[in-house]
Amino acid sequence: MTFLASLRSRDDIGYDDLEPAIRIAAQAGITSARRLKCLVAPYLERKEKEVGDLARTLERRLSQFEYALDRFGCGVVLNAKPKSLAEVAALAREDGDCFGLASGAFGQAFYLEKDKAAQQAMLDPVPIPTGDPRNDAWLGAIGEHLAQRWDLEVPPWTQEVTFMGGQKPSFWPDEGLARDIQIVETPPAFRRRLQFTYAEPLMNAKFPTDRKVRMPFWQ
């Protein structure tokens, strides 16, 4: 775990070398990047004035930690597979660390469903806010985006203030060199909530190939 605590480059260390530390962290209840970030927060407060790119370095290391958790089967496990965005929100209220996993599982279920009425029914139930503004903004963006891309009715709840995001932009992944492309490629439902990401932010293994968007400058 020293590569996370020190935030120094450790190019000589691979994921397999970190497996014992990853498993120890998981046994101690550190099963997500968010939990690790809470632990290193005091260190960051002391160092933020000394290290110019600290925030970006931290996000990159946390992403590596999340990958390692998944690789060794030590990450968050869902109690149930959500069939609606309301169920995604319910799981996230129980454990905020599972939002990404829950929304991904919902996406897979949505893509496998071929009946439009059933897809609409997966979007319509009104979620109870998770308490995390960014997660709530993503819920609204997911509901609006899927409805637009699959020619469904945009659920009214997605336009409520709680699910519209704040005034501060968020970039995922947070890489300075990617920001210009993210601003251009991010779909409208995410852009209007200042959540900048990929052209296909909800891509996963079940995403229909024929629906993948192609940007003009990709050719």
Image (spheres, grey):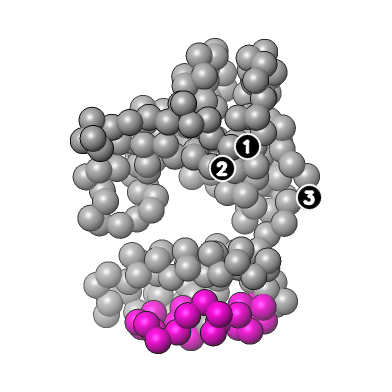
Count of numbered labels shown in the rendering: 3
The residues tagged by marks 1 and 3 sit, at their Cα atoms, a distance apart of: 16 Å
**Looking at the magenta stretch, what is its main secondary structure?**
helix
Q: Which residue is mark 1?
A: 108
| SS for dot 1 | helix
Q: Is residue 3 left or right of residue 219?
A: right
Residue placed at 39% from the left, 50% from the top? Answer: 172
Q: Nearer the viewer, residue 3 or 111?
A: 111
How many residues crowd mark 1 within 10 Å: few (<14), some (14–19), many (20+)? some
Is 18 covered by the magenta stretch? yes
Q: Nearer the viewer, residue 156 or 212?
A: 212
Q: Nearer the viewer, residue 136 or 63?
A: 63
Q: In the rendered view, would you say 69 is above or below 93?
A: below
Q: Is residue 191 visible?
A: no
Tell me the number on the disc at residue 79.
Answer: 3
Label 1 amino acid? Answer: Gln
Residue placed at 26% from the left, 51% from the top? Answer: 178
Q: Percent from the top left, x then y, of residue 109? A: 67, 33
Residue placed at 47% from the left, 80% from the top? Answer: 14
Range shown magenta: 2-25
Q: Percent from the top left, x then y, of residue 188? A: 36, 27
| SS for dot 2 | loop
The residues tagged by marks 3 and 2 sit, at their Cα atoms, a distance apart of: 21 Å
Q: Is residue 146 left or right of residue 26?
A: left
Q: Are marks 1 and 3 in contact (CB under 8 Å)?
A: no
| Of the two numbered discs 3 and 2 in the rendering, the one whose residue sits closer to the viewer | 2
Tell me the number on the disc at residue 205.
Answer: 2
| SS for dot 3 | loop
